[in-house]
Amino acid sequence: MTSTASKTSLRFFGLGGSNEVGRSCHILQYKGKTVMLDAGVHPAHQGLASLPFYDDFDLSTVDVLLISHFHLDHAASLPYVMQRTDFQGRVFMTHPTKAIYRWLLSDFVKVTNIGANSSLNDKDENLYTDEDLAESFDKIETIDYHSTMDVNGIKFTAFHAGHVLGAAMFQVEIAGLHILFTGDYSREVDRHLNSAEIPPQPSDVLIVESTFGTATHEPRLNREKKLTQLIHSTVSKGGRVLLPAFALGRAQELMLILDEYWSQNAEELGGGQVPVFYASNLARKCMSVFQTYVNMMNDDIRRKFRDSQSNPFIFKNISYLKNLDEFQDFGPSVILASPGMLQNGLSRDLLEKWCPGEKNLVLITGYSVEGTMAKYLMLEPDVIPSISNPEVTIPRRCQVEEISFAAHVDFRENLEFIEKIGAANIILVHGESNPMGRLKSALLSNFSSLKGTDDEVHVYNPRNCVPVDMEFKGIKIAKAVGNIVDEVNEALKLSGGKKGVDEDQDENIKEIDEGTIVSGILVSDEKNFDLNLVSLSDLRDHHMDLSTTVLKERQSIRLDCRKELVFWHLKQMFGDIEVLIDDAGVTVLHGDAHDKHHDAAKAKESDELELKIMGDIKLNIINDVATLEWSQGLINDTVADSVMAILLSVDSSPASVKLSSHSCSHEYHDEHELQDSEIQWKIRHIVRLLKEQFGDSLSLQMVETDTKTTKANGKPNYATATVTIGKNTAEINLTELGIVSCNSNPLKGRIESILSIASDLVAPLC
Ligand SMILES: [Zn+2]
Ligand SMILES: [Zn+2]
């Protein structure tokens, strides 16, 4: 094995859920891969304003989108992302999340559309339609807990997060870097769910929720007791109890508590005289989902299910209410109703109906987001606005209490989890600014002893749309494979390594002295970032899909001149030309060849001519199509270029005109003129070669005098080019292919080697 270290940076970019609870959406970018985490809406806002800041990021670049759980603040803008933006990535969630998501979002579409129609009557305010939801639903892929998917080198594994049925934490791995995203998580074993797991693989980066900041929950049993006692005393006094709850998740947990309490205290509660209702059509629809996935819940509920052979989510003491029309409000009762934050719908209607009664109780059990009615109600206002008519206010005399059953970790649980994960970089999300800030300070002071060491813990609490860049030492490890292992062993011996490299045993990694060179080919797998070091001769054995290849170039053009002309020009340029095929006898230029040509042309439909030029360049001409084929290389490419130039210019060359007009004559009257035009042609090509090498540093002074006069005067024909690179200048005699002057030796050497290639090319002419 061999390794190289280079710094690479991971970018975290929050589009929502940074310094707020709601519209969770985070972007991770590393090594050219982009992962998006969650696509929620903000419960305190409506329409487009409830979305994460999607306009601030190019969603078409996202490779994978992972949805942690079905709650609206994590999943409700997914159909918008999939149907109304440039997003083209793949979307994953767990099976139960997908099953519940469908019901939940169609309900969300209904509720938001009603809201939009009544307030704005603006169709654009609808984030998406039922059709969008249905179309996007089919494209969502599912992932099992503890299974790992690999999408173009992005590996991710789902772990139990507690919180709600189907909630997942995702550990993402890109090129050896591990990032854990908790989503919403709970470390408490409640009545139906297991607590969040610690992934076996350590993580470099932890993206963790901070909902409760530094607050600590009361013990679970105390809270249950408080809840049941408060409800019991309220109904005993003839009051009504409203428990606003999110339709799915915590509502089921509360019902498990209430159903048990009602069974155990039937007599005190008047033997069924105090009804408990759950006003949610959605929850009833989703009961089958909860039953289907009992195997994903904790031992306790699984035992209950096994022992009673009945669905523990079918409650003996709780009835479902489709809507308030069928509810007869005659005496004390307990109603669980959604939505949990009293923004609209059934829970809001009941609140407005019951809040003037002082015997009544509104019991908030979930987390209430800033800006919602639930949050406002906890301030115990004297009046609340009516949802149907904001001009009207309703007096509030009812009791308001909060007992949290929100399935989020408290500070103690969060800290314990964070310590177990041991990531050096912690990014706080899903929390209001103040609790999040307090959590950051608490974490920093907790890890203060590591400050300044290699294990220093960094805690980030970025705002939405403010990127966080984290540098990582990207260590590339390449596995030596095949014959090259011997070479590496040799290098190890030289540098004093005791053990050699064993192909199968990774533990035997030894450091080779820096500066020791082992050469081979690094074969990287784009998909999973694996690197193998193999010797060239082994390439085919170890990588069936790779082999050494000589690149062949091929170009075809249509000719509109005679083959004799082409051959003649090529011969002038390159001297000896090997004739491979000559059906028409065009290469036999003299005397009777002409007659042969006519005979052959008559006998054969196609008269093929195939020539080999400068050893490696094949020119084939059939009818009027010329095809040039050669193996890539500097000299070959240049020769091929020249051949192509001849093919293209052949009929416009003055020599061609002469040759054509005296096609049967072998006397070239003006030898000088013919040669001069070829010299110009040669210079043009040498200039091109120089131009390719020096680009704009090359300037030409074509001191090209009229050839006839110079010849007559006996003076040499002369053309120069000047190359200027900084202070260095070279003057080149293009006609004689020599350097006239040059003030820099390296430049001189470079030009000399170019000229030697050039002189090879044009040798027959010089
Ligand atoms: Zn949640
Ligand atoms: Zn949440």
Image (tube, rainbow, N blue to C red):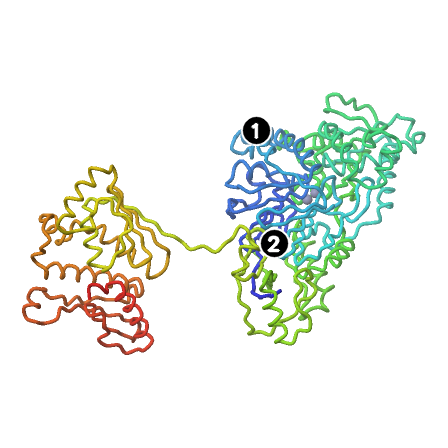
Residue 355, which numbered label? none
Q: Which residue is mark 2?
A: 174
User: Which residue corresponds to the image point at 79% horizontal and 24% vertical from the top-left?
Assistant: 329
Q: Position of residue 372 (x, y in %)?
A: 66, 41
Residue 358 sits above or below residue 425 on the image: above
Residue 22 figure quarter? top right
Location of residue 424 in the rendering, given as x and y in whole percent from the top left corner: 67, 62
| Cα separation between marks 2 and 1 | 35 Å
Is 297 on the left-hand or right-hand side of 731? right
Residue 693 in the image: x percent, y percent?
31, 65
- In the picture as drawn, the residue positioned furthest to the right comes out as 267
Residue placed most toward the observer, 235 or 298: 298
Q: Residue at x 56, y 50 (%)?
A: 34
Q: Position of residue 380 (x, y in %)?
A: 74, 42
Look at label 2 and name its amino acid: Ile
Query: Residue beneath label 1, please?
Result: 131
111 or 142, which lies in front? 142
Q: Amino acid at mark 1?
A: Glu
The relative height of residue 314 versus residue 213 in the rendered view (above or below) is above
Q: Nearer the viewer, residue 24 or 213?
A: 24
Sort mark 2 into few (<14), some (14-19) or many (20+) by Cα contacts within 10 Å. many
